[in-house]
Image (cartoon, helix red, strand yellow):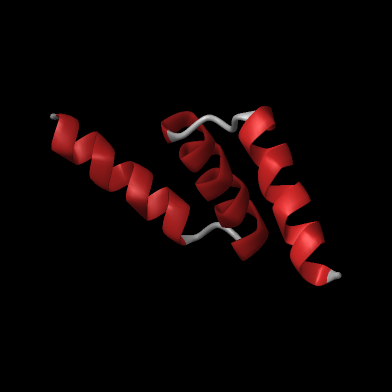
Amino acid sequence: MLALRQEQLFDEIDILPIDLKTKIVDKILASITPSNTLIDELWIQKANKRKK
């Protein structure tokens, strides 16, 4: 039964426009690896230093 619902979900996703698919992917990734603003800020600082 779960496999059938999963297939239905995949079928529904297949017909969505690309912008909605990317939003879904972003939400899924965020739920798997929540962002850490401190780490993000450190990476931004490092990237900015390398740009100079």
Relative to 51, 4 lies left or right: left
Task: Please tell me whether residue 31 is drawn above or below residue 10 in the rendered image.
Answer: above
Residue drawn at point x = 62 percent, y = 47 percent? 23
Residue drawn at point x = 60 percent, y = 64 percent? 18
Where residue 4 sits, quadrant-wise, is top left
How many discs mark residues in the rendered view?
A: 0
Query: Residue 6 placed where, x, y %?
Result: 26, 40
Task: Please tell me whether residue 36 is drawn above or below residue 14 in the rendered image.
Answer: above
Query: Residue 40 placed where, x, y %?
Result: 67, 40
Relative to 5, 22 lies left or right: right
Residue drawn at point x = 51 percent, y = 49 percent? 25
* Residue sitting nearer the eye, 20 or 1: 20
Relative to 30, 49 lies left or right: right
* Residue sitting nearer the eye, 10 or 50: 50
Where residue 14 sits, quadrant-wise, is bottom left
Query: Residue 34 placed where, x, y %?
Result: 53, 30
* Residue sitting nearer the eye, 35 or 1: 35
Residue at the outermost right position: 52
Residue drawn at point x = 61 percent, y = 62 percent? 17
Rendered-image quadrant of the C terminus: bottom right
Task: Please tell me whether residue 17 is drawn above or below residue 45 in the rendered image.
Answer: below
Rendered-image quadrant of the N terminus: top left
